[in-house]
Amino acid sequence: MIPPLSSRPGHDAGVRRLTSLSQQLAQAQAQIATGKKLLKPGDAPVAFARVATLKRADAVAEAQRGAMDAAQGRLSASEVALAGIADMVMRARELALAAANETLGVRDRAAMAAEVRELLASARGLAETGRRGARTAGQRARPCRNARRRW
């Protein structure tokens, strides 16, 4: 007599195949929904590590880009301040040459000296104020409290 063929192994194989396809479909739908091919490190460990490395490199590059933009802004502010100071120095030089004229009186020289003092104050203001109130030049290092102490 021929033993009856069981359909159970064939049925189990079909169920396993459908379960596998269902899981693959769920993963594909999740990838489409998130727009990411790698959803968890187990999907592709090497690729996931590479993506993490690239994200860190991108973050570092973005930070450097921000630092370069800030430096460019400070440089522009410094250039503007120095151009203004150069104009003030030229005016102070003109006043000094004019004051050397012996035909000028004390009052004229006093007025020129006052203008030079105003130019100096303006130049200090330009040197100390830059982009967003940050100092561009003329910064003095403050000595520490114990700077006068003799060792």
Image: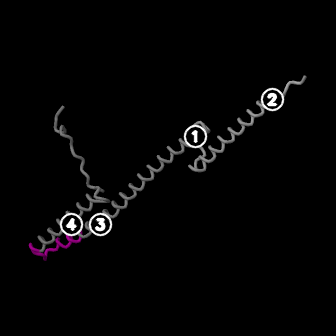
> Which residue is depicted at the point 16% across and 74% down?
101
Q: State the extent of the magenta-drawn residues as a range.
A: 92-107
Which of the two labelled residues, at mark 1 and mark 2, occupies the earlier sequence position?
Answer: 2
Disc 1 marks a residue whose amino acid type is Phe
Tag 2: Cα neighbours inside 10 Å, few (<14), some, or many (≥20)? few
Other residues around mark 1 within 10 Å, as few (<14) / some (14–19) / many (≥20): some
Callout 4: few (<14), some (14-19), or many (20+) C-alpha neighbours within 10 Å?
some
Q: Is residue 80 left or right of residue 11?
A: left
Labelled disc at residue 64: none
Main SS, magenta region, reads helix
The location of residue 50, given as percent across then percent down, is 57, 41
Question: Which residue is label 3 attached to?
Answer: 84
Say which residue label 1 marks: 48
Q: Secondary structure at mark 3?
A: helix
Inter-mark Cα distance, 1 to 2: 45 Å
**N-term mark: 1 or 4:** 1
Task: Choose between 132 and 17: the one closer to the eye.
Answer: 17
Amino acid under disc 4: Leu
Sequence-wise, which precedes: disc 2 or disc 4? 2
Residue under label 4, please give it.
119
User: Which residue in the rendered view is the most extreme toward the bottom?
Assistant: 103
Left or right of 13? Residue 57 is left
Q: Nearer the viewer, residue 116 or 93?
A: 116
Tell me which amino acid carries mark 3. Answer: Gly
Specify which label sits upstream in the sequence, 1 or 3: 1
The residues bearing labels 3 and 2 have C-alpha atoms spaced at a distance of 97 Å
